[in-house]
Amino acid sequence: MANVAVIGAQWGDEGKGKLVDWLSERADVIVRFQGGHNAGHTLVIDGTTYKLHALPSGVVRRGKLSIIGNGVVLDPWHLIREIEGLRGQGVDITPETLMIAENTPLILPFHGELDRARESQTSVARIGTTGRGIGPAYEDKVGRRVIRVADLADRRTLSLRVDRALTHHNALRSGLGLTAIDRDALIAELEAVAPQILPYAKPVWKELDQARRRGRRILFEGAQGALLDIDFGTYPYVTSSNVVAGQAATGSGMGPDAVDFVLGIVKAYTTRVGEGPFPTELDDADGARLGTRGHEFGTTTGRQRRCGWFDACLVRQTAAISGMHGIALTKLDVLDGFDRLRICVAYDLDGERLDHLPTASEAQARCVPIYEEMDGWSDSTRGARSWADLPAGAIKYVRRVEELIGCPVALLSTSPEREDTILVTDPFRD
Ligand code: GDP
Ligand code: IMO
Ligand code: MG
């Protein structure tokens, strides 16, 4: 029996959704364990595109159980819209196929408002968030004033929880020049959405324990990427949750040994959305070519993603922090046709060679990449489904990546299509 955790190894958008969908054929249960609808996971199945934000990417497959774990922050109104949208695409979602942990914190409208108000302030405060209220909702969770799914079931509890949250938020809003929240209107909105959410609410930890005892295979789906992790990312330009593999257990209600294989999803180059340091960022024709060939526009906000060369230093670091057993290298096809490719192998910081990204953001911003150059390849890897279909130059690149990050390639992805995937080692090995 093997359970697998899928983790983004860079700044998100590595292709986690595609790989989770592909792997979920082999899994019984798919669990999201952190983040919220800041995530944007794109699946392409026989030419049809599905965009998932709050729902696990296993939801499109029949006969699988999808779970939203307690480590997620959930906007109930968004969830209902996302479910409706997918139903419109013929995806069946019922309380038999989707469960939400009862202890999941809710994102409320004032969280999004606060997030956007902060982002529109001075440039010093800007993180470049998705504006979806993720940070403020996690702040309320840790501040012990968030409203959780289970609170929707009881009118009295709900009204007490709302008062607790508003005591804090109305004081904050007055400082920001925002109007006070209409308590009764908010309670009415929550009471209206409750019957649409509560049928999915379950003690998820128990369901997962039972699934595990019955030998079911569990796939943990991470959102964002390790460099956006609240502890290990490029702080403060990060998201507000732990996204590293250790969170899979806490964010779903299982023990630390629940994960047998940590699969890092690694883009064959690097991208980032929002503000913050990015040592290998390219501001030239190569960067533009990566963006165009890779269609690097955000699934959630439509923002153009910043692009740069592959940074082996960063991935070596995130592979260690998440204890990755293997990686899925994605978007290799985007590198087709480059004459020369560069890989960052270390940084120069004020004349000193560093083999990892320093912690202080000011030092991160001053890191100058030290590159290794490789010949590109002229043949296409697009749509390759076996190792034998790859040009020698591409194989050399993949081997060099493995060597530099100290972690083997378990899967390769060569287009957005589900089946354009090469399996090297099965993460669900028995
Ligand atoms: P996620 O957030 O990690 O799930 O990644 P996104 O879905 O936000 O971004 C990845 C984008 O790349 C999506 O549009 C995918 O359809 C696409 N994609 C995934 N794998 C590949 C690949 O191997 N090659 C190409 N060209 N596109 C890919
Ligand atoms: P997926 O799961 C890429 C980034 C935002 C911003 C920072 C904080 O699709 O890989 P937040 O709204 O979370 O408070 O924003 O994190 N960010 C992502 N970047 N992919 C994501 O998710 C992201 N989720 C958040 O752009 O820089
Ligand atoms: Mg994404």
Image (cartoon, grey):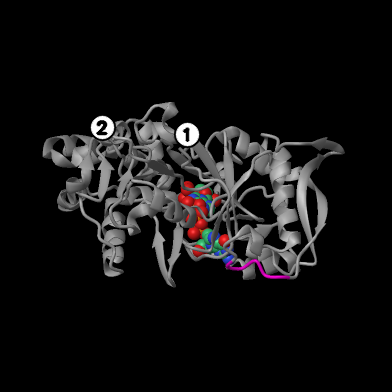
Mark sitting earlier along the chain (2/1): 2
Pick the residue in front: 408 or 190. Answer: 408
Q: Amino acid at mark 2?
A: Lys
Instruction: Point out the residue furthest to the right here.
Output: 351
Pick the residue in front: 3 or 365. Answer: 3
Q: Which residue is mark 2?
A: 206
Ligand 1 neighbours mark 1 (CB distance < 8 Å) = no
- Counting from the top left corner in percent of width and height, residue 27 is at 38, 46
Instruction: Give left or right: position of 101 versus 156.
Output: right
- Counting from the top left corner in percent of width and height, residue 172 is at 38, 41
Residue 422: in sight, yes or no?
Answer: yes
Question: What SS does tag 1 mark?
Answer: loop
Quadrant location of residue 156? top left
- Counting from the top left corner in percent of width and height, residue 94 is at 21, 54
Instruction: Point out the residue furthest to the bottom here.
Output: 47
Labelled disc at residue 260: 1
Is 79 rendered above or below residue 46?
above
Q: Residue at x 63, y 58 (%)?
A: 387
- Counting from the top left corner in percent of width and height, residue 102 is at 24, 38
Instruction: Point out the residue furthest to the left here.
Output: 155
Pick the residue in front: 203 or 126. Answer: 203
Is 410 rendered above or below residue 356?
below
Label total for image: 2
- Bin the neighbour count of mark 1 within 10 Å (Cα to Cα): few under 14, some 14-19, many 20 and up: some
Q: Amino acid at mark 1?
A: Asp
- Bin the neighbour count of mark 2 within 10 Å (Cα to Cα): few under 14, some 14-19, many 20 and up: few
Q: Nearer the viewer, mark 2 or mark 1?
A: 1
Residue 303: in sight, yes or no?
Answer: no
Q: Which residues are magenta?
A: 379-383
Q: CA distance from mark 2 to mark 1?
A: 19 Å
